[in-house]
Amino acid sequence: MKYFIAFLLCMVSTMAFADINKLRREAISGNPDAQFQYGIYLYARLDSIDIGEAHDWLNSAASNGHERAAAYLALLSAAKQDFKSANAFLSTVTDSCAIVDNLTSVYASVRAIKSIINFLKSNSQFSIIEYGPLGNDIPFLFERNDTVYVCASLKGKSGLLKLDNRGLRIGHDDIPLSYDYIVPMYGEQINLRSAVGAADSYIGFIVSPYLYRIPITDSDMRRLDIHGNETYFSIYGSERERVRIPEQFVYDSVRGSYIESDAEHNME
């Protein structure tokens, strides 16, 4: 399982550009969009050697008027509790700006980023970059129907925050911050913009530990949807018919699958 989790993390940070050297040359030439994309590419790799250079390229893009770069830097600054820098970057961004980036898994408007900043200002004990099994993550957030969804952790436990446009927490119990880690994922053959448009079907989360109840085949993987409902998907990318759940069926990773007795079921 841990190797598959690592594979999923790599999927999030895999570069889609066919010619990274060409992109780098365009960035060096002063193209702000290339500077932004190259900086995102380096940052998404989560290699400590690349992080400093990534920020340099993002700063270059922002200095050259690239609003998405400035908005993304505002988000990164807020994640590190540097709200002065976050506000400075946001002051250069218009309200119509939005980050839509498959590499870093961010789909958010400036309003959404402001709501996260407002939340973190009042709740400094939360983190939006330490939610995964490695504890060194890139922010995963998206905006849907006036709600901001963001993976987060609190006191070493992870889950999914849901915020309104003022930065107030809503939906506390859908995927509570009570797991050892949470791994966000969406279909590898769909971009983030499309995934958010059909988030109920395409965006899901693997959390651990979790007692799953859906029996599935070896080619499927269990996960939670954005509402905390248990679902599953095929690791081969094809859709599968939902398996009927036998009454009182329990999947337990330690004990194995079994049917609860009436006494066990009534104890819950």
Image: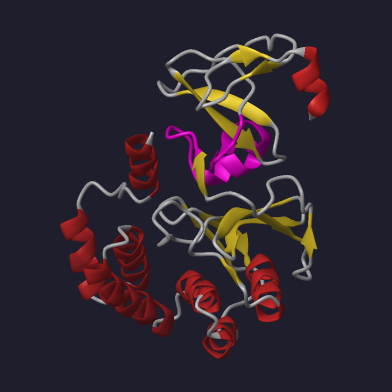
Residue 58 left/right relative to 257 = left
Depth check: 70 or 262 in front?
A: 262
Q: Does residue 248 appear in the picture of this structure?
A: yes
Which quadrant would the N terminus be assigned to in this image? top left
Task: Identify the residue at the far front of this view.
Answer: 263
- Residue 55 pos. (x, y %): 34, 76
Q: Image point 48% across, 35% down: which residue?
A: 190
Asked if residue 202 lies in the magenta stretch, the reply is yes
Depth check: 194 or 213 in front?
A: 213
- Residue 85 pos. (x, y %): 52, 88
Is 63 drawn above or below residue 225 in the view shown? Answer: below
Q: Does residue 242 appear in the picture of this structure?
A: no
Is 125 drawn above or below residue 227 in the view shown? Answer: below
Which quadrant would the C terminus be assigned to in this image? top right
Q: Image point 45% across, 72% down: which residue?
A: 69
- Residue 98 pos. (x, y %): 58, 63
Depth check: 62 or 145 in front?
A: 145
Task: Identify the residue at the far right of this view.
Answer: 266
Q: How does the figure colour the protein chain or chains?
A: secondary structure
Residue 170 placement: quadrant? bottom right
Depth check: 165 or 206 in front?
A: 206
Residue 14 left/right relative to 231 = left
Residue 119 placement: quadrant? bottom right
Q: Image point 80% across, 14% down: which residue?
A: 262
Q: How many marks?
A: 0
- Residue 149 pos. (x, y %): 66, 54
Residue 163 left/right relative to 230 = right
Asked if residue 82 lies in the magenta stretch, the reply is no
Q: Image point 49% across, 64% down: which residue?
A: 129
Which residues fall within the magenta stretch?
186-211
